[in-house]
């Protein structure tokens, strides 16, 4: 089991100009002070800036300025099952991101192996097709990568590269039907407006099998949590692939191509691949492993109201609360353990807002005597898949879903 | 946002979250024009700093590299070659060694 270190946030203010007078500091937060946070990643570096510099976004953990990688501060997940748009995590691949979107001129093209190529305006999409809504978790393939041991390269996320929103949009199936998919189509490829700085670098594109694309659940979203998407979350249109990792949720979606051959583009065939093994796990250094594109998510659960290092009262009831999600299925149950996984008890589940979303859970427990305790949580999804009690490992740092724990002291 | 929706739910006595949220869904999208912040942070001074500053900051800010864990020289070489081969970073061949050595000196293990 892994200690949920991401909960152990220590917010500090770093004084960039050490010569400032104490009196000035006492009156107000100086404009040059930087709010910092520690993500205690094994071996570090763990210090990150909390930034409010990004448009339409509140305080976010700055992992990378350009292209933006912004992590959701973990305490946000205690507020409810829907992650606020202004603190929803952000992840871009390439640095050329349009910052000026004219909604009258924006068009989504549908082409390739279809009877009738389309160019749809935003009005066509908002008013010309049936609207649908769905709650779904969007989680980076590499969420929690910073906890991999041995460490691996990539965005050094703690557990905040995930979020749950109520997505509003249209079914991808309806858009494809409007274009008329020709017999022999095998995949559908999605491309957004982001572009690489270097001209011959691979444009970011992802593909889904044709049957998946037409399953009636995959959608093209124009709103999250009842509002248009923040630009850095993919305004104006984002693909929503419920139950699948966020790499497929193409942002600023403006191009859909129906393919009559499997997609061989870099981002589908080479990048974002996982070992074809249980939990996508291999031994560090293991070679000659069959790799497959990352796909369905797996269950996870977290304590959100108590962080590692906190003190709780012994011999008095303590509320333990958190979130869980089932991955590609709903949450069947969330269990908790106060003895490092020897015994498990079932927590109470909150309202079901949809099988692909976060589910809140809660329990009351009493730690009978003073001392150190490890409080663990474990989600089982409705397909019977349970979080493992040992961490997985792969060189890309994908699909972590080990049982997480917070360490507390009962006094 | 959801606090507003939830209060509306209570006020109207409507049980369905979906119905309320649907009512709040935009019927048109407003144009957006924003500025994204950039970073002028350079890599710390040291042998090879010019090579890494000149070759690597076009595609990504320095913080991405500085936030990486300590890695072996071989692992840093793999990363630099990944940038060249997979992501087409136009790094002059004579700079590759200097960049790998710089990274190993700064964040080696």
Image: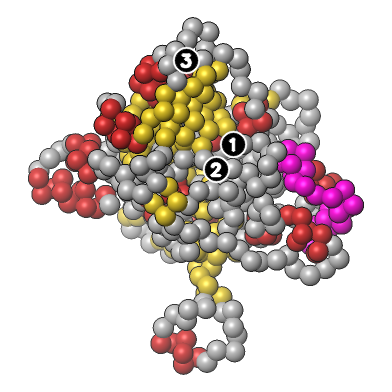
Does A26 appear above or below A386?
below
Reply yes or no: does residue B85 show up in magenta: yes
* Quadrant the C terminus of chain A occupies: bottom left
Front residue (pair A179, A93): A179
Q: Chain of mark 2?
A: A
* Residue B86 falls in image quadrant: top right
Residue under numbered circle 1: A204
Which stretch appears magenta?
A: B83-107
| Secondary structure at numbered mark 2 | loop
Residue B26 visible from this viewpoint: yes
Q: Residue at x 51, y 58 (%)?
A: B36
Q: Are marks 2 and 1 on the same chain?
A: yes
Disc 2 to disc 1, how far (Cα)? Answer: 7 Å
Whole-number angstrom distance, CA of label 1 to CA of label 3? 22 Å
- Badge 3: chain ID: A
Q: Earlier in the sequence, mark 1 or mark 3?
A: 3
Q: Which residue is mark 3?
A: A114
Q: Are marks 2 and 1 in contact (CB under 8 Å)?
A: yes
Quadrant of the rendering where the N terminus of chain A is positioned:
top right
Residue at image mark 2: A194
Res. A391 image quadrant = top right
């Amino acid at each position: 089991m892994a200690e949920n270190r991401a909960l152990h946030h220590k917010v500090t203010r770093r004084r960039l100009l050490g010569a400032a007078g104490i009196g000035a500091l006492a009156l107000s937060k100086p404009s040059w002070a930087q709010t910092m946070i520690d993500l205690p990643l094994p071996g570090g570096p763990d210090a990150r800036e909390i930034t409010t510099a990004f448009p339409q976004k509140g305080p976010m953990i700055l992992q990378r300025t350009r292209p933006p990688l912004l992590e959701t501060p973990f305490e946000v997940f205690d507020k409810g099952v829907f992650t606020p748009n202004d603190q929803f995590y952000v992840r871009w691949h390439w640095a050329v991101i349009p910052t000026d979107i004219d909604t009258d001129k924006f068009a989504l093209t549908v082409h390739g192996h279809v009877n009738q190529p389309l160019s749809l305006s935003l009005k066509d999409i908002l008013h010309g097709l049936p609207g649908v809504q769905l709650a779904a978790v969007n989680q980076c393939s590499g969420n929690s990568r910073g906890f991999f041991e041995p460490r691996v390269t990539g965005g050094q996320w703690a557990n905040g590269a995930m979020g749950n929103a109520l997505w509003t949009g249209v079914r991808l199936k309806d858009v494809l039907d409007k274009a008329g998919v020709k017999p022999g189509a095998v995949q559908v490829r999605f491309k957004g407006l982001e572009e690489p700085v270097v001209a011959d670098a691979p444009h970011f594109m992802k593909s889904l099998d044709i049957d998946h694309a037409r399953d009636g659940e995959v959608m093209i979203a124009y709103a999250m949590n009842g509002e248009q998407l923040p630009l850095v979350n993919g305004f104006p249109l984002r693909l929503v692939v419920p139950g699948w990792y966020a790499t497929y949720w193409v942002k600023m979606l403006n191009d859909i191509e129906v393919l009559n051959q499997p997609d061989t583009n870099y981002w589908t065939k080479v990048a974002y691949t996982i070992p074809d093994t249980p939990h996508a796990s291999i031994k560090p250094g293991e070679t000659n492993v069959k790799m497959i594109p990352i796909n369905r998510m797996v269950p996870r659960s977290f304590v959100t109201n108590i962080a590692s290092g906190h003190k709780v009262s012994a011999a008095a009831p303590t509320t333990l609360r958190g979130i869980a999600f089932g991955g590609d299925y709903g949450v069947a149950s969330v269990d908790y353990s106060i003895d490092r996984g020897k015994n498990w008890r079932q927590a109470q589940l909150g309202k079901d807002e949809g099988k692909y979303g976060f589910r809140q859970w809660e329990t009351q427990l009493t730690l009978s005597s003073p001392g150190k305790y490890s409080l663990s949580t474990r989600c089982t999804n409705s397909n019977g898949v349970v979080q493992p009690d040992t961490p997985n490992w792969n060189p890309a740092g994908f699909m972590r879903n080990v049982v997480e724990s917070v360490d507390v002291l009962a006094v | 946002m959801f606090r507003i929706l939830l209060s509306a739910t209570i006020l109207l006595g409507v049980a369905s979250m979906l119905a309320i949220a649907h009512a709040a869904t935009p019927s048109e999208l407003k144009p957006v024009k924003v500025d994204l912040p950039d970073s002028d942070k350079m890599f710390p001074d040291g042998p090879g700093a010019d090579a890494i500053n000149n070759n690597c900051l076009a595609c990504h800010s320095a913080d991405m590299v500085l936030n990486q864990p300590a890695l072996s020289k071989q692992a840093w070489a793999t990363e630099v070659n990944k940038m060249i081969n997979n992501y087409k970073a136009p790094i002059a061949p004579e700079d590759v060694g200097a960049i790998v050595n710089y990274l190993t000196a700064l964040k080696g293990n």
